[in-house]
Image: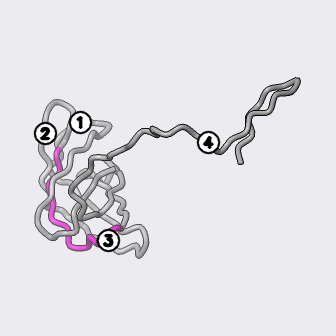
Amino acid sequence: MIVLAPVTTEQEFNILPREPKLLTGHTLVITEEGSKTSQTITTAAIYSENKDMICVAASFTILNENQLYKIAITDEDGNNWWRGKARCTAQTDFTLKYDNNTTADTDFITLTDDETFTTLL
């Protein structure tokens, strides 16, 4: 999933299309999933980042915080070249911090019978 910021300045994101060719007469359509508001961009810059990754640079005017978007790029013949989803957020720290459980569970009773099992309360 692509992460975009809720700004109107140009943003870049990398994609991995099924057919890694550079497009010249392409169209990018971004659609908000809730309201179905869409924006069509014919001037988005698409250039090769390396052999297979393609970088897309575009300015969006419909981005709203905490919304999901569908992005579709079609080639000059109108054929679907790439499609994906994006999330709009102003969050900049994407590192997840997890803590391991360091305390032992004390809320259980072990019953001993013909079969041994644990019952959680």
The amino acid type of the residue labelled 2 equals Ser
Q: How is the image coloured?
A: one colour
From which residue to which does the magenta span run?
55-66
Residue at disc 1, secondary structure: loop
The amino acid type of the residue labelled 1 equals Pro
Q: Residues within 10 Å of mark 1 (few under 14, many from 20)?
A: some
Q: Which mark is residue 38?
A: 3
Q: Which residue is mark 2?
A: 48
Q: Residues within 10 Å of mark 2 (few under 14, many from 20)?
A: some
Q: Quadrant of residue 18?
A: top left
Of pointers 2 and 4, the one earlier in the residue sequence: 2
Residue at disc 2, secondary structure: strand
Q: CA distance from mark 3 to mark 2?
A: 26 Å
Q: Which residue is mark 4?
A: 106
**Identity of the residue drawn at 29% across and 40% down:** 17
Of pointers 1 and 3, the one earlier in the residue sequence: 1
Q: Which residue is mark 1?
A: 20
Q: CA distance from mark 4 to mark 3?
A: 53 Å
Q: Which mark is residue 102?
A: none
